Amino acid sequence: MRSATAGQRGSVGLRFWWRTFEGVQDLFAEGHGEEGGPDDPLPVKTYRELPRHVLPEPARRIGDARWSFEAFRDAHPQGIPTLDVLDQRALSALLYWTYGIGRIELGPHAVWPYHRMVASARCFHPVELYVWLAHPAGELPPGCYHYNPAHHAVTLLREGGVPHAVRTGTGVRAEAGLLVASAWFRKTAFRYRDYAYRLCAQEAGMTVGNALLTGAALGLRGRVHYRFDDEVVNRALGLDGREETAFAVLDLAPAGEAAPAQARVGSPQLPCVPCELPNIQPVHVQTGHTSDGAWSGLTALDLTARLAGPGAAVTPDDFRLPVEASGPDGVLGLAGPEPGAGGMDLAAALRARDSGGRMFLPDARPVAFARLASALRYALEPVSSDHTEAPCRPLVGAYVLVLGTDGASPGLYRLAPGMEPPALLRLPARDWRAVVGMLCDRTPAVNAAKAGAVVFLTADRLAGDRWFGARGYRVLHQEAGIVAQRVSVLAAAAGLSARITNGYHDGMVRDLIGLDAAQVPVFTLIVGRRRPTAQYEPELIW
């Protein structure tokens, strides 16, 4: 539970961090690292002198991309996959399709060649993925492993099933095991300095969101834990807790089992016993010599966000804006014909997912509204997490600026997931042209004016501060990351690209949507059809 001292230390910093940088000059005024030089960190974390196990070839097809969505499961109750045993092949598929390298860019202009299953600023991929097996997985004994995506292998860090200290410090049951997503700040901060905290939190959310998609397709149920004892989890994984720290813990269990009750702080039968965990200091290759003092603001804020265990349940309604009234002509239903269970393979969607290329000039032909609807209809479906006992809707709002879409009038809409079926509700007329021009100016590598739509994800920073304290900044950015990954993957399944960009003027977007000071935009996705380019990005064939 967050101490009062930590909350007081974090309150001033949070006001700064929630204020989005309003221009690239604000970011680069503090200095930034040079790519391709001696300070460029190693793209993949690599351990030395520890047992490494190469995983089997990952399955080429793994299951429907929509099994993690409550509405889809309710509509297809007979086909829900269930994985009884997390064996080595299932583990291979889970890790690869969550965070493996899906394609490699070749040629003389391949600046960022290694593309994983989630988008990352300049392909730095600061998230590290760990898996803790509660039971043997084929030849792999129970224990804590680090996933190396470059070699599709795992490195054993600690032997044995999930210890009591980790279970109590996180509130997990770990029937099958755990996934832990950490943020290795150096991999992004050497370039983006303090601004890397935002990028790391967003990518952690996208990675967790992808793990939820992949696990459900395979037959696993996942529950996200944002609030846990940082000291215990970092110690268990051998992380220093400063340059790299755990951001999210995903509790894994067979999908057929009932969801476990949430273990809360203060429960007398769950004492915290970190003494169970001997300290480990696994050695890994380190490159880059920039002092972490160059991103001291990032480190200071992260340290104020530390917790000593799970927190109390939140009230999700505090994070939701009321649904605006809209006439019959302003409601765009998102339900429509879609493939049945098994008709939208997640592996195929992840192979197709991209960000439109380095220079994203969307095809000028209008995007069919049915494609856009397919990308959005499940965006705000409930997530099982430590916010509440039952799954609840992500703690973010979603607004869609419809531009070049065939079958929908241009304008700003709000995604209303509570309607049946989910729908886009048109907001009163607003002049959105200036915002589109701003997006083109701030992110010249993306021509937003040619997009089919622009999606804005927002969060209530005051509710985040009230419920999570200094932890709120990264929790809500992770929540938005889960939604962004859903949109990206389902857009790919519909033949579209989704480009995530943080290059926007916060005030202009807030004014367009009509947000008060508590609501802030935290994500922008440019959605459109990619044109053929000279980039050569072959799939990674196993």
Image: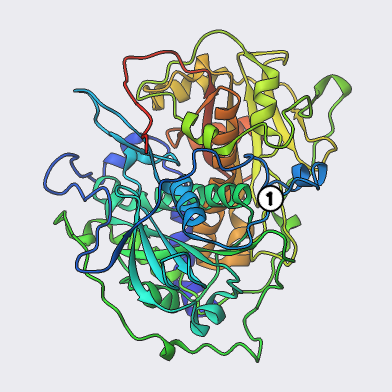
Circle 1 residue: 81
Q: Quadrant of the C terminus?
A: top left
Image location (x, y in percent) of residue 197 = 39, 54
Residue at x 76%, y 29% (from the top left corner): 334
Image location (x, y in percent) of residue 541 = 37, 34
* Residue 398 left/right relative to 188: right
Q: Is residue 524 above or below residue 243?
A: above
Q: Residues within 10 Å of mark 1 (few under 14, many from 20)?
A: some
Image location (x, y in percent) of residue 471 = 51, 65
In depth, the one of 387 and 277 nearer the eye is 277
Q: Of helix, strand and loop, which one carries label 1?
A: loop
Q: Which quarter of the picture shows residue 469?
A: bottom right
Residue at x 43%, y 39% (from the top left corner): 119
* Residue 430 left/right relative to 178: right
In depth, the one of 275 and 81 nearer the eye is 81
In depth, the one of 73 and 228 nearer the eye is 73
User: Of the residues shown, which amino acid type is indicated by label 1?
Assistant: Pro
* Residue 56 left/right relative to 400: left
Q: Which quarter of the picture shows residue 254?
A: bottom right
Q: Is residue 192 above or below residue 445?
A: below
Question: Does the image show residue 202?
Answer: no
- Which residue is the extreme one toward the top? 365
- Which residue is the extreme one toward the left? 38
Q: Is residue 498 above or below residue 294?
A: above
* Residue 492 left/right relative to 463: left
Image location (x, y in percent) of residue 501 = 45, 34
Question: Does the image show residue 374?
Answer: yes
In depth, the one of 123 and 509 nearer the eye is 123
Q: Quadrant of the N terminus?
A: bottom right
Residue at x 27%, y 68% (from the top left corner): 51
